[in-house]
Image: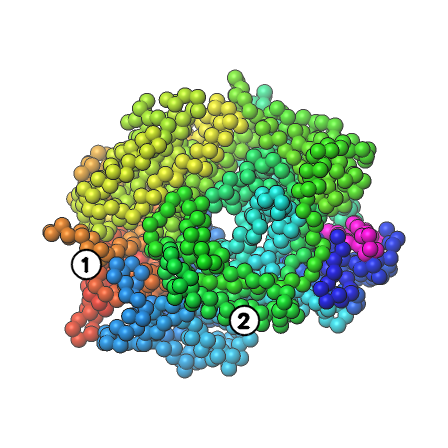
Amino acid sequence: MTGVLLNSLPGVRVAIDRGGTFCDVWAYLPKHYYQPPVDPELVGNADIIPEADGSAQVTFKLLSVDPANYDDAPSEGIRRLLQLIHGQPIPKGIQYDTTAIESVRMGTTVATNALLERKGSSYGLVMTEGFGDLVEIGDQTRPDLFDLSVARKHKIMHDRENVVEASERVTMEGFSLDPKAPSPQDLVERSKSDPDYAGQVVIGLSGEAVRVLKPLDQTKLAEDLQKVYDRGIRGLAVCLMHSFTYPEHERQVAQVARRIGFTQISLSSDLSPSIKVLPRANSAVIDAYLSPVLRDYVQGFNSHFAGGKAGKRSEFMKSDGGLIASDRFTGLRAVLSGPAGGFVGCALTAYSKSRGRPVVGFDMGGTSTDVSRFSGSFDMTHESVVALHTIACPQLAIETVAAGGGSRLQYKNGMFLVGPESVGAHPGPACYRKGGSLAITDANLILGRLVPSQFPSIFGPNADEPLDVEASRSKFSALTDEINSSLAPGQKMTIEEVAAGFIRVANEGMSRPMRNVTEQKGHPMASHDLCCFGGAGGQHACAIARGLGVQTVVIPRFSSILSAYGIACSDLSAERGVAISAEVPAEGLSESEIYEELNRRIAALKVEVVTELVQQDIAKENIDFTVTVAMHHEGSDSELDVPFSIKMHQDFLDVHFRETSFHMHRAVRTANVRVRGVGRSYVGFRPNDFAVQLEAARKENKPVSVKPIQISSSFFEVNGKVEGLATPVYALGSVATGSVIDGPAIIVDSTQTIVVEPAARAVCLPEHVILEVDVEVVGKNADNDDLSVDPVMLAVFANRFMSIAEQMGHTLQRTSVSVSIKERLDFSCSIHGTDGALVANAPHIPVHLGSMQSAVMAQHRHWLGKLRPGDVLLTNHPKWGGTHLPDLTVVTPVFDPNDDTKVLFYVASRGHHQDIGVTAMNAVSKELWEEGIAVKTFKLVSAGKFDEEGIVSMLEDVGKRPGCSASRRIDHNITDLQVMALFKEFGEKTVLFYMRQIQQVAQNTTKRFLRETYDRFGGKPLQAEDYIDNGTKIKLEVRINREDGTAVFDWTGTGHQVHANSNIPSSLTYAAIIYGLRCMISADIPMPLNQGVLDPVTNITPPGSIVNPDEFLAISGSTLTTQRLYDIVLTAFKAAACSQGCSSAVGFADGGKDHRTGEVTPGFAYGESCGGGYGAGPSWHGVSATHVHGTNTRMTDIEIVERRIPVILRHVKIRRVTGGRGQYNGGDGMSKLFEARSPCSFSIVSQRRVFAPKGENGGGNGAIGANTWNRRMADGSLSSVNVGSNGMGRLQKGDQFQVDTPGGGGWGSAQ
């Protein structure tokens, strides 16, 4: 397995991966640099692998952070390597002579850490005028639904004084939802005779028509940038509106900035030439923030070496799995530098072309676990979330979960918790001899799955001691005593049972991202092989594979340092892309203009790619190209990448069907084309296809002949019990090729430990260990007659149910064609018990919490005993648990396979649909029929047959057919199978028992909170009241019974129902209560969100009141009155000041049904909601321009809005100082100004335009909001009209509509 540099240059080649816990080193030593024997003192913990030609490969690990012994792990690794090369000690602290090193390749977490720790470089930000706050606002969502402080909301990385709003504006000409959309060329011609809008219309890079409304004012820009420069800022991020297709203004900004002297200029149009201004802006910001840090790191790293270079060539791993010269390494390309190398190594070592089975890579490190999929080509993504920022950048599609060998172990609220906190590399787990806390590594050590004598001696103050078993045991003993003190006498656990419990919970958590990269995209997990690597991966491989139904686990030779090995085997790469928007014909593509244009664009991009690679010493003949086209259906912004070919139209349809399970009868369009070039730099170092060797070993079935180096007492779960088994330990290097080792066994070398569990076996091949797992063997596969609560199983089931609910959400988002579901994420999914009570609700939209249960229980009661397999129910009626009519709920019963009359559980999904029978959101509706279709119950699917005729008939009765029926059966595939797998694995009685027990945990936690609240307020009733804008009072009194731990939420005194759309169904009072309780219960307390939270609650909603209206009245209250309920609940408990108290739902529409003539005109409907100020609390300032409490939908990207409908946004900004003042200030509201490009209707549904959000504990009130219609007069002036809280109107061309959302209340008296 020797390697040869293509141009035959001699020298040592080094690859390093600096991870969060360990720094892994791989090196190839040509024979003239490897002179055995090597002094054992110099070898240390390195593993030297001699090759037949006299060369050698060297691998070793060291801690990434060890300040007592070195300042930089990669340079320390090279020092140790140089000792081996020269055969003599090399002192620390000098500049090392690296003339023997040909190349150094590195993957590093430096950029990621700088981003997470906010240690980047200062920069200025240039945005289009009116949008200077856009990066700060983000997508207006909050990352943790139940954190009232919104502590994890992304923080801006720049000073506001360094934001420059460039005087310029570009927008799209025409709009995609136009039923009679003219061609771009026609739009250019029309613009020449259009006197109403200034500016030239041109064809942009994407092929779309672009109007330059205002050229860039370079004089003013230069003045503003000079001020930023004079403050000492040298970096600049630039993102202007629609620069993906019209980059000219950004290039002009760069020219001005260079003249002034800026040294780091990051243009969004260069970094990410694709539509969506927010991801593009974030990309520019991150690049400007991190690139100087990377340059400093590279220079600091090289400063350790004589001549200022670590080797003749120095290259770094990018996030897309390719290498780049160190002097070209930039911040944006580096955020996934570390994990990318591992998945390149996984693809090269674990994917067998002859087997043809896709591989899921499972990289379990010290602080996190990364997962990716390879099926002959890498799954790539061009939009991802990094450190809570959505960025646009080519990256390997990697899912990450905060669980690794260093994940902290805790026991809280009767449940086992693993992570997300990590003990880190310093001090590390308890066994690292530095006073650390218990972690997964300690659990494996206690269970005998790590062999201290075989583990590297790199611990303790001097980094030269082995693992400390006694430290782990001592801390596990204390934790076991704590756990046993909360258990019944017959349930006491041993130390080993506790450790095994934590391992099982960790395995559940690490399995979730594996399902995301497979089943979420339409690939069954069981059809994959699992490649297990990372320092801790081999200890968990068998258990995770069995839980996922995977029979074959591939563990490569260098599994514990596979990231470094993958970096060594990687190639240099470069990518270029360009936006191009055009329809792709289903037939005759080769003769079409778009095909010709694509070929022209591809040729130009290839020239750019070749130029970049040649400048990095890659020969043209060694460059391979991959060309992909991002495509989407007309009217959808969800893109799928397919290879460029003559059949790409059909390829797109095939991929779309695989991922969504349905076909859309819409035109197919391109979004962009990308060319990726890979420059082959090395051959060799790549293992052979293992399939032939595996088949031969299976046939021979040769038992292991070497004696074990020791027999360990290791603990495994056998038939539901943790048992100690005599477990042989084998040194991998001494096991003959082709040997088969039956479990239980442990296989070790200097860098890894592989655990072969019972009912599994290991097949040892020359360059792999293959684990073959019996997936039919499970820990608990039968019901017990006498079940008792097991805290481990509680955590396992809580994790599994939540994972399934999340999978439902991913599937719903993937299969839906509703914009509100797919892009704004206005949906929720849940699992319900036999009686319809909530078991698990993924944290999607809070207003659906609690109310979903009411809907399912209503269907359960109505259809009891009448449902059969294959039935699916539809409902949205407020009296049957609905929120408002656009929220359609689908309920699916799942039956006992042996009894088609016995419902085991229900799954449900609720999603917002923009058009359900009315032309647009009716802001002034008074009765329910005015809001569209109202369904108490309807059997949407009967015995597997979709009742299309019935649903169409209902919809046609109120208007027209919606465009979203294709998402109605998302529950049937993955969800049912996953939940039924639980019944198979554990038995019906056990699963149903833990459904109830998970609810019991929530109930007990809520009761404890209510008792604590009773004591805090001295037993007095808790009271609060507020008013909605029409003057109707909402009043709440909470009376707590301390003895029972129960509470009565009494809404008596609330005003009468109204002939308007501010009524709210009583189901949503439950939503407010369950949300408020979960927010007030400490986030440190693990508590599943389910019916148990509401079990101690009696909820009194007076009939005929605004919170329990008669069924004929309008109830658009989910965006209105419900938000007031959240404020009132939190105010009663003195938990926080009031937030903005509404969602400011704004809509635009044209066409539809004329109620006077009955004529239907083609048109469009579009809507979204707007964030505002969050209320302050006892220890936090409120967050600005964010969705509050009951909703958490994304803001549609501005460029998407302007492409889709005939509207231009003039500004999106924060209403500064509109939050209430106090010791802690309330968050500020947001302002959005829309301008009509052609006549259309608008509507607004909002609150807090009359009554301000209240401050608390002496804090000031937040400012009220406002809705303003600026009507264009004949002389061109604007006349402003206050629309009130709710309103509708008809905008003419040039009219404007402005939404100003309220601020949040302050907390405490201002100092």
Q: Which mark is residue 607?
A: 2
The answer to whether residue 1308 is left or right of residue 721 is left
Residue at 42% of width from left, 52% of height from top? 650
Q: Secondary structure at mark 2?
A: helix
Q: Which residues are magenta?
A: 41-64
Q: Residues within 10 Å of mark 2 (few under 14, many from 20)?
A: few
**Residue lying at 28% horizontally and 70% vertically, measured from the top left:** 186
Name the amino acid type tagged 2.
Answer: Val
Q: Nearer the viewer, residue 346 or 278?
A: 346
Q: CA distance from mark 1 to mark 2?
A: 53 Å
Q: Relative to the observer, which residue lies in front, 118 or 16?
A: 16
Q: Is residue 59 magenta?
A: yes
Image coordinates of residue 422 in percent, x first then y, are: 61, 46
Please report the residue visible at 69 percent of the width from the left and 53 percent of the height from the top: 686
Residue beneath label 1, please?
1289
**Is residue 281 visible in the rendered structure shown here?**
no
Q: Position of residue 1042 (x, y in %)?
A: 41, 30
431 relative to 109, above or below:
above
Query: Which-is-in-front pick, marks 1 and 2?
Result: 2
Q: Residue extending furthest left? A: 1156
Nearer to us in this view, 1110 or 901: 901
Q: Point out the residue furthest to the top here.
A: 785
